[in-house]
Structure formats: C-alpha cells, structure tokens
Image (spheres, grey):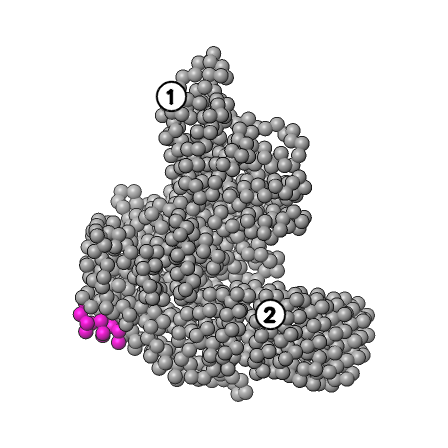
Amino acid sequence: MFVLDVSENGGWQSESMFAQDLVLKQRTEILHALCSSGSTEHLEKVLDILLAQGELTWEDYHNLRIPGRALYTSARQLLDLVHTKGVDTCRLFLAALEQVLPDGQVAGISFSGIGSKLEKKEECESTSIQTLLTQRPGLVSKLQDCIDGALEALVESGHFTSGDCGEVQLPIHTPSQQARRLLDHVRSKGESAAKVVLQYIQQKQESVSPQNQEKLTTSRELLKYQKKLSSSVSAQSCFLSTYGGTSHMSLDDIYTEVQLELAHDHADVHRPLGLEDIIGSAGTVNEEADTVLVSGEAGSGKSTLLQKLHLLWARGTAFQDVFLLFPFSCRRLNSEQGELSVQELLFQHCCWPDREQEEIFQFILDHPHFILFAFDGLDELKQSFSDEHRLCCPTQRAPVHILLFNLIHGSLMKGVRKVVTSRPEAVGPLLKKYLCKEVFLKGFSPSGIDCFVRKHHSDSTVAAKVLESLQTNTALLGLCHSPVLCWIVSQCHKELLGCGDGSPQTITDVYLMILQHFLQHQSPLKSTIGLGWLQKHLKPVLHLGQLAFEGIETTYYIFSGTDLETCGVTEQDICMGFLIQSKDMTSTHSKCYEFLHVTMQCFFAALYIVLSSNTDRSTILKLFETQDMKETGLRSTCFRACLSSTDQHKHTVEGISTATETSNLQITATFVSGLLSQRHRSLWLHCCPTAMMEKRVRQVVRCLSKGMQKHFKSIPQPVEGEKKSMHAMPGFVWLIKCIYEMQESRIAKDALSKLEVDHLKLTYCNIGPVECTALAYVLQHLRNPVGLQLDNNSVGDVGVEQLLPCMHICKSLYLRNNNITDEGIGKLIAKGIQCDNFQKIALFNNKLTDACTQHFSHLLKTRQDFLSLRLGNNNITAEGAKQLAEGLKFNHSLQHLGLWGNNIGDAGAEALASALENSKSLVWLSLVGNGIGSTGARALANIVRNSTSLEELWLTENCITTAGVECLIQALKHNIRVKSVWLRNNDLSVEEVEEMTQRETRLIF
C-alpha cells in the first residue's frame, strides 16, 4: 500500500496530482481488484459512475464495452484512458473505485488525500434523457429487479417492440447488464421513452409493500454489521459453490436462469417466474405463512439458484427490502451437535457481530419483515419435518432441527421471511400447510441449455460443436435439462466430440464420461485412454466408492479426515477432483470434504457396490427394496452388514429417516442398473471376476422384473362398464428408469406382456425429457394400445420428441400443462399421422399459437378415424381457427373439439361454423372464453340447426347478447338431438336470462 502525506497547503491541485500518481503506481492492484472475481460487474459500475459524472463520453463508454473482449484488456484500456484524461478524471475514478469495491478489496489500495467523496450532480437536468445519464448508477440498481415490468410499460406505450425486448433480455446477460442495455435502448428511442421508464421506476418505488414502508432507525453498529454480513455472503456466493467448486467459476459468468413454476395455478400470474418472484407476493396461497419452498429434483439447480439470490442481495442489486439475509446449509447444520438459541444460530453459523450483539438481535426481533432466512437442502437434514415440539422463545436453546422446524412453521420469529429448498419427495402434507407458496424448479429450458453451454465455453467454436452434437442426440439433449448433467456434458466436451456414434444415451453414460474425464486429467500422456482406463485407477475409485457408500447408507454428506483415512482415501485421491473442501463453519481445526454433488456420491457408491468384493451378497437385493422400506417405515439398514461394528456405531443416527434417504438409495440403484448394462461390461473385465458380475446382473434383472410385476398386480379391477386404468404408484417411474439405464429390453417385454390395461395415468410424476426417454423405451413393448396420460409434468418439446418411439401404442395422449410449443407439436403430429392407433390428443394449457394449427389441419385431412382434439387455454386466434377449419372441412370422424380459453373471436367462430355446420360426427364443441359475440353465435347456430350428431355446445364466458341467443333458440327448434347449449357469463341481464330460459330449457345460464 502506498502511504501519502498530503500537506494542508497543497491545495486541490496537489490532491489531484497525487490521484494521478496513485492510478499509475497502483495499476497492478487496481487491475486485480477490478478483475479477480471474474465478473465484469465492478468494472461496469465504475463506468456507470464516470459516465454519469461526465468524465466519459458515449464513444469512450462503448469503446470500453466491446463484446467478447477479455475483462483484463478492458480494465487496462480504462486505466490508460483515465490517466490520459488527466488529474480530475483520476480523482473521480479512485472515488468511484472506493465506492464500488467491497471492503476486502479496498483494503489493498490507497485512496489517501484524494478528496474521494463523489459529488452529487445538481438536479438541473432539462430532459429525461439527461436524467437517464446523470442518474445512471442508481437507475441500474433500481431497474435490474424489475426488468420485465419496465419492458412491459415500454411495449404498452408503443416505444419498444418484442425484438427490442429480446435484445435487452438475452439470457447470457446478468440482470444489471440487462438494465444497462435497457437504458441504452431507451436513450436511442428518445425523450418520450425516457419519460416512460422514469415514471415506471417512480411508481415502482412508491408501491413498496406496506409491511416494508416503516422507517428503519439504524445505528452505526447495525450498519457495520449489515456491511460485514453482506461482505461475508458475497464472498461465499461469488463463485459457483456446487459441482463447479474446484474450478473457481464466477457465478456471474456461468449462472443461467432455470424454469420456475408455481405449484398452484394463480390467476394473477400470467408470465414466467423470475428470481425476484420467489420472495415476492406472486403466487401466494397462504397469507398467514412466511415460508417459501423451492422444490426440485437432485441436480436441478436449487443450491445455485439460492446462491444467486444471496449474491444479488449482498451486492445491493436486488431484494433491497431485505436488510439482513442469513444463509444456512442444512447439510452443515447436521454437524451441529449441541443445543442453540436462535441468536446463536444466526451469529455462529452466519456472521458474528463485532460489537453490540444484543442490540443487533433486538433489531431482528423488532423488524422481522426486513429479515430473510435461507435454508438450502432441507431434504439433507437427518430428521424429518415435525411440528410436535413447539418453541416460541428466541432465546431458548434447542437442537438445531427443532429450531429450524419452528422457524418454518412460524412458532419462532413470526414475520421473518424464509426460503427453503428441498427435493419434492422430502416434503409431505404436514410441511406444506405452513407454506405461503411452493415454487417448482424445472431445470433448463432448451434456450437455457444453449445459454449455459455458450457461457461455459469461452471458445464459441467449441460451444457450437457441443450444441450441434446435442441436437443430433436427443436422448442426451433431454438429459441436459438437468443443470448438473449439462455441466458434465460441457465439462467433458472433448470426450463428447470424440466419441462419434457411441455418444452418451443414459445418465450412467454421462457420469462414466465425467469419471474418465477427471482420471485422464490426472494421468500423464493420456495413459487412461482405452478399455483399461478404469482398471488403472481401480484402487482410488474403490476408496472413494467406499466413502460414498458409507455416507449414502448413513445419510452422511460431509466427511472428516478420519472418515477419509478409514476408507483409505489419500491426498492424491482428493486431488482427482471428485471431493471438494467443505465450508463447514463448525469445524475450524480440521478440513472436511464433500463430493462435488450428491449425485456424484450416489454414482461412486454404485461403483463400489458393483466392483467391490467386500459388499454383502444381499446388498443389491435390499437396495432395490427401498420403496418397500419407505412404505414400511424401515431405515436403510440394508447396508449395515457391509460395515464393521466400529463404523456402524460411529454412523448410527438416532432419529427418523428422511425421504431423501430413500431417494438417494434409488439414485444409487439407478446407477447400479446402468453400470451392469451389457454396453459397459467390457470396462469391468479386468476389474472383478466375471462370475461375480454375472451374478449381480441376474440379481438386478430379477429385482426389476419383480418390481414391475408388483406394480401391475396392484391394479384394481375396473368397475363394470369402465375401462381398466393404472395410476402409477410411487417408484414406478424409477423402476422404468432403471430398466432404461440397464438397456435390457427383455425385462420390459416380459413385464409388459402380462399387462392388460386400457389407460396409463402418470400425472404429477415429475416427468421430464429424461423420464420420457425411459418411458418410451419400456412402453413400446406393450401388446395392446393404451391411453397415455402425462398431464401436469415437465415434458416440453424435447420430451415430446423422446416419446415418439412409443406413439404406435398410444390410442390417446394427454399432455395438459407441459410447456409444449408449436415446435414440439410439429414433430408429434408428423409421427402421429403414421400411427394407426392414435385417435385422441389433449393439450390444454401449453404454449401453442396459430402456428401449430397447420399441423392439426393436416392431421384432420389425413386421418378419417381421428376422434378428439382438445387445445384449450393456449394462444390460438382467429387465424388459427381458420387454419383448423380447412382441415375440418375434409374430416368426417372428429367427435370432440375443445378450444376453450383461446381468442378466436367472431371471425374464428364463423370459420369453424362454416366447416362444421353439416357435421355428422361432432358430438361436443367447447368455445368457452373466446371473445365470441352475437355475430359468432349467429354462425354457430347453423351447426345447432343442421348437425345430426351434436349434443353439447359450450359458449360460456363470451360476449353474446340477446340477438345471438335468439339465433340459437331458433336453431334448437329444428334439432331435438342437441341436449344443452351453455351460455353462462355472457352479456345478458338477469331479466333476459329468465325470459330465455322459459322459452328454451336446453339453454344453460
């Protein structure tokens, strides 16, 4: 550090000259401070300030922000420019730097004697455009938490097009970068656009929720504690802490938005959820509760999502109504053996105040609405959620899990907002009744996969090759919807691009690829290439496998040095990269370790089960009984015989097993199935005896066959007159995934040859593209056609493509609420036309537009045995209805047509009526909520008059007046076959409804 002595008589000129010297002499330190995080955020904040202060021109600004340029290059150019511009610019640059950098980085740079207070610009701006410039730093901060709303205001005012919005919201940019792009676009649109943005921001500031409008009285010590806490949270969050923990990836550079969905449909939410909606009011179902649950499968990105939330708060760029945020890892809370009070929990596990602990804790008690607790990984807590032990006093000591449960259900610290992440299976009805809302995390969208891969590879050519490879392997593309698998595929791009036709198809394939990738990078001269690569590293793999195996068996995810030593794990084994040092705050004297990801731990446990000669012969049999254990309340004692008595005593857990214990055993069993696949047996040739391997293969095959038969035997006999239906029991989808991982079609053939059902129901089963691949692999062997119901899952376009191999056995396909777009429909219908059994489809509540109707029109023209088409609650307009009508003119088989909740209007109704007025097959037609008026009703009356088959017409929630109803009444006089015409909630008075009901009883109001 440079220590400068500025004399009192030196004056302003001397201070400025010292500032110029400081910039020059501290160049290395400043470059490191601006760039060491790997994020451009510090540099861009400094540029914002200099631009607002008038020290940079727009030309300077854009020259410093050339896309694709290395961060250090841009920082060096800025330093050169600042020094060239002279002493005043240097002084303001250092002042901006001091304001932007966290305390930890400021400490290494001297700002002595530069008069470093930034001068607030005089508010004499004559135009809104000038205000955008002079207030830029503050506007960026305010905008990044409400980009969607600002864009909506600009679109509604006619200043922005959808193309402009797309340019601003490119997913590769962070929220603050999107805010800057928005401001730059607005500047180019002129004064009126600038006014719209400024008015929107002002309204947003004025509409802060009432609970947070109270004035905060904050002491100096409290502000110091907030700064210390935010610095601590920022330091823990700025690098990816999960599977990327060994490579120091900047969270800003790699974070990619995932798909978020509310667990309950909410009338007020008509847009995709963003990160800020997690603790916002959107989707709230229980106003009395304070806890938000974010649930998602293993590897779906829960921890990274929470880490991003922490980082945005710590930087002050979002969640500004939260004064203090306390982050917790439930995995690490497991290691807390003693009893704690809430105060001790907050200060010992998050950040200890230097002074005035009681004053700070009292502030937390007095202002709960300004506090946020974040608990990551509730599913990894050893105890299951309970509300039996009630605590009300925040100073009373209790075991950590009791404190946590009382915080969640609100007995403790009522009013404090809580965010909890968990896997779905660990969340039961008891916990759900204490939630204000639940948000499902659905992994990457197709555009998210593209964005993540491009962020992961600085070389755009490599990224393009990886994405091209994924497009040619839809099974692998489906796997990449899981962020952890997308990371593995991106990490192993060389192996992926070099494997040709043998590219990964299953989850096990992907994890073997990352295993080979890590081993190769530890060995000189690529000695691991070839079939013997695993044999050369068998010893360390088994050491890590034993550690993982014992951890899965006892729900241990953090391991001490003693644990590693017991399993023979050496320092060299740690250096392979599968273990990372755990940030366990309770262990200050010895290092603790954890696997890169819990799925990686499951994979190594599976390797140990398959390759080790030390596992008990009943291990595999009991591993595949995890579903039975869950149903009978047994814990995972199935592996206990494999451990020494010392280990058994050490790892015994007093308490109730969690649902995640079963889930991790199921993931392990899935990997065991995959590892014993015929396609991988060449790897094991020199690793263990062939006889032992063959025995284990037979064991797994028997377990899977037995499991499938058990599910089929549970199907109840149908009620007389109804079709036989099977609703998937818990574990059915898991069994199917195991069969797919093992690539044993004979198991599927043998099991399904005995199945006789008409309808398979798999609703709310968390089925995504990966599960669709497995389902198609198994279900294609059904003997007889079935109806397949997959409503309320996450199938998406990629999942639709994965289902195509089993389309020939589908009589009907129900895909309500599955995020399917026109692109997926095109592929689905192209295949469906070729399948003789395919006769019905339901696609309510997806993302379909007029573009999909050309495919359905072609289907209706081509197939004269198609019976039912339901497209309710999508985005189909009159143009789409006209396209459908072209197909309906030539179809003589369709019985049910549902278009409720679209927007076809009168023009669309007229087109459909013209096509259907002489139909001899249509029985049921629903056009509820389509903006149809009396003109449309008059046209539809022709169907009522002339159809020889129609029984029900639904026109509820439209705009029909008495003139339209009169046409329908007259038409009904000519057709006694029609049973009802539904007209509730149209433009009719009570008196008109009463009079018309008396005239025609088949009108339902």
Residue at 41% x, 61% y: name it.
470
The amino acid sitting under disc 2 is Thr
User: For mark 1, what is the residue?
Assistant: 3
Q: Position of residue 494 (x, y in %)?
A: 32, 56
Residue at mark 1 to residue at mark 2: CA–CA distance = 73 Å
**Any part of residue 222 in sight:** no
Residue at 59% x, 60% y: name it.
266
Image quarter of residue 488: bottom left
User: For mark 2, what is the residue?
Assistant: 853
Image quarter of residue 487: bottom left
The residue lying furthest to the front in this view is 461
Q: Of residues 475 and 368, which is closer to you in this image?
A: 475
**Any part of residue 468 in sight:** yes
Side of 854 relative to 585 (left or right): right
Residue at 49% x, 65% y: name it.
796
Residue at 33% x, 72% y: name it.
743
Where are the magenta residues, as a range?
688-698
Q: Position of residue 975 (x, y in %)?
A: 74, 84
The amino acid sitting under disc 1 is Val
Residue 691 drawn in magenta: yes
Side of 339 relative to 615 (left or right): right
Residue 614 drawn in magenta: no
In this rendering, the answer to whether 211 lies above or below 818 is above
Magenta part mainly helix, strand or loop? helix
Q: How many marks?
A: 2
Q: Position of residue 627 (x, y in %)?
A: 36, 70
Q: Earlier in the sequence, mark 1 or mark 2?
A: 1
Name the secondary structure under disc 1.
loop
Callout 2 crowding tier (Cα within 10 Å): few <14, some 14–19, many ≥20: many
Q: On the rendered image, what quadrant is the C terminus found in?
A: bottom right
